[in-house]
């Protein structure tokens, strides 16, 4: 019994704490990527939706939807929202090809592209944008599709070309600038 109720309770607590700590942030429930099946994913989403509702009663934006159609109803939505999975980017071999495959399969959905898989966040984003605006939108009869980019870069790596926190220093005056041999510019 605890295995069934424990997941929902932990997710409710975690969702509440996240939403209350970041009251002006809208969250998306993405349990699908961590779940071995529909039953666990449903329990986790239910719990998160309860925690989110409690946070909303206390002024937080909370969770606005789920990454799955299966659990979207917990958040008052008909369909899931979110991004393409990491696996499709690896399978496709390029971020652009993954975006094209996603659009081919989900032709009515907006496109949120996961652009950090290969560590080329900026160049992959530009490549996808060029394709979207130069080629795809011409065939979009509705004109209602939207394109967004998602960075899911983990804490040990920063976006392409960015400096890590160990490369930054803070001066006694409070100035924060990249470590270099040049004096602080501010």
Image: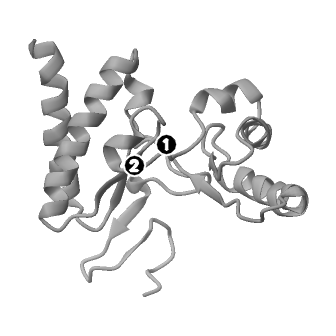
Is there CB contact under 8 Å for labels 2 and 1? yes
Q: Looking at the image, tell me whether mark 2 or mark 1 is earlier in sequence order.
A: 2
Disc 2 target residue? 65
Please tell me which residue lies in front, 120 or 84: 84
Disc 1 target residue? 80
Q: Is residue 120 above or below residue 148?
A: above
Callout 1 crowding tier (Cα within 10 Å): few <14, some 14–19, many ≥20: some
* Relative horizontal placement of residue 185, taking residue 95 as reference (left or right): left
Q: Position of residue 59 (x, y in %)?
A: 17, 68
Q: Residue at x 75, y 44 (%)?
A: 107
Q: Position of residue 47 (x, y in %)?
A: 21, 36
Q: Secondary structure at mark 2?
A: strand
Q: Is residue 95 above or below residue 38?
A: below
Please tell me which residue lies in front, 46 or 114: 46
Distance between mark 2 and mark 1 Cα atoms: 7 Å
Q: Position of residue 174 (x, y in %)?
A: 27, 79
Q: Is residue 41 above or below residue 103?
A: above
* Residue 149 location, quadrant: bottom right
From this viewpoint, which residue is outermost toward the bottom?
Answer: 186
Q: Residue at x 60, y 39 (%)?
A: 84
Q: Residue at x 44, y 41 (%)?
A: 154
* Residue 42 location, quadrant: top left
Callout 2 crowding tier (Cα within 10 Å): few <14, some 14–19, many ≥20: many
């Amino acid at each position: 019994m605890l295995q069934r109720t424990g997941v929902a309770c932990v997710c409710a607590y975690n969702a509440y704490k996240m939403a209350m700590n970041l009251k002006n942030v809208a969250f998306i429930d993405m349990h699908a990527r961590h779940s071995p099946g529909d039953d666990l994913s449903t329990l986790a989403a239910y719990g998160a939706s309860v925690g989110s509702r409690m946070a909303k009663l206390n002024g937080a934006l909370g969770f606005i939807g789920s990454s799955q159609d299966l659990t979207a109803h917990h958040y008052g939505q008909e369909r899931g929202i979110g991004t393409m999975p990491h696996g499709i980017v690896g399978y496709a071999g390029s971020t652009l090809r993954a975006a094209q495959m996603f659009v081919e399969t989900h032709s009515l959905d907006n496109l949120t592209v996961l652009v950090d898989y290969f560590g080329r966040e900026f160049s992959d984003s530009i490549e996808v944008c060029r394709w979207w605006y130069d080629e795809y939108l011409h065939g979009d009869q509705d004109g209602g599709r939207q394109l967004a980019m998602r960075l899911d870069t983990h804490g040990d790596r920063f976006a392409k070309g960015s400096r890590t926190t160990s490369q930054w220093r803070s001066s006694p005056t409070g100035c924060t600038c990249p470590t270099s041999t040049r004096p602080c510019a501010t």
